[in-house]
Amino acid sequence: MKHPRRDLLQRERYVVTDFVQTSRGCPHNCTFCCERGVNGDRYRFRPISEVIQEIEALPSREIGIYDLDVFSKPARAYKLMEAMVPLRKRWQGGVSSRIAENDELLEMARKSGCYMLSIGFESISAESLEESNKGFNLPERYTALVKKIHSYGIMVFALNMFGFDSDDESVFEKTAKFWIEARADACAFSVLTPYPGTPLFHRLRAEGRITSYDWSKYDQGNVVLVPKQMSQETLRDGHRYAYETFYSWESILHRFPVLGSRDRFFWGLTNDFMRRFELRSALRTQVVRDGTTLSEERLAEHVRPNASGTLHPSPARSQ
């Protein structure tokens, strides 16, 4: 692969500004996720030697590995992290809750310089997880998983969504307080967004519950769907409330890593960034009911209802 145009990044929008991607695609079929439609329905991996060369060329010591799941194939993940040890880089990346408790991988992650893992927990409700086809997440094990990852000196960035059909008005306070008590190091809260081509999109479109087809508003902050158990305004305000609660000074003091070997400087930097930037972003989000319509011509082939999620080579590539 050619190296990406990193000069195009708006670096002021990120805590970590050097990124690398070692795989694409995903075999899971989470109803809200567009990964299968965009990058295919199986994991595809770059050669480890090529990845290591790219990481070596990055100027920063801190890097982000932005695979959908760094641990997706444990044997391969172990080899990749083992090859990273001599580079003396510090890295963060995303993993699934299903494999994140693997002690062998966590120990090698620590040795290779991992300081934070992002995990798509999505919801603390088993019903919402079943609804989104992500039942392999087990809310009753979340707190223990956070504690285990902390024991390796690694921070946990918990990713959550609001707006599932089983969510009611109590979900915002319950979720924010849950992660405060679980001592998550950081949290991101998203508004459920029906990306084109996803099962969620096709279902909500058929039910007449999408209020805007302006793709520029599809940013996981603006509300473009009609929730089942609350108003759109309640979803918008609850999203803001969760950020305000989790990043309150009381919460920050409660969660601060007094014990253990987590990086306190980067912990503070991450929470300060999230408090200033993400909270401000949440305060700007809107309910979008703009009357835009959608014709079939605006849907690319890979996002139509009968699309398989399997990538096909373009004519240029096949030649």
Image (tube, rainbow, N blue to C red):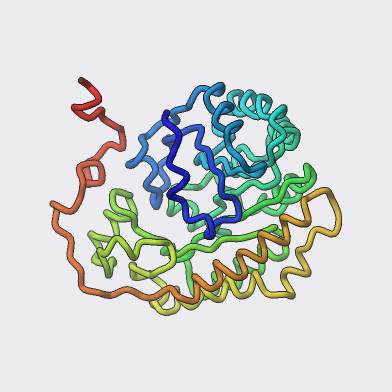
Q: Quadrant of residue 53?
A: top right
Above or below, 41 against 75 in this view is below
Q: Residue at x 58, y 33 (%)?
A: 57
- Residue 153 picture location, percent across and down: 78, 45
Q: Residue at x 76, y 48 (%)?
A: 150
Above or below, 143 against 64 in this view is below
Q: Residue at x 72, y 57 (%)?
A: 267
138 or 231, nearer to the observer: 231
Q: Is residue 45 left or right of residue 118?
A: left
Above or below, 64 against 313 in this view is below
**What quarter of the picture does the N terminus occupy?**
top left
- Numbered-mark total: 0
Q: Quadrant of residue 242?
A: bottom right
Q: Is residue 240 left or right of residue 294?
A: right
Q: Is residue 313 left or right of residue 279?
A: left
175 or 248, nearer to the observer: 248
- Residue 92 picture location, percent across and down: 63, 44
- Residue 161 picture location, percent across and down: 49, 61
188 or 134, nearer to the observer: 188
- Residue 21 picture location, percent across and down: 50, 37
The residue positioned farthest toward the right in the image shown: 259
**What quarter of the picture does the C terminus occupy?**
top left
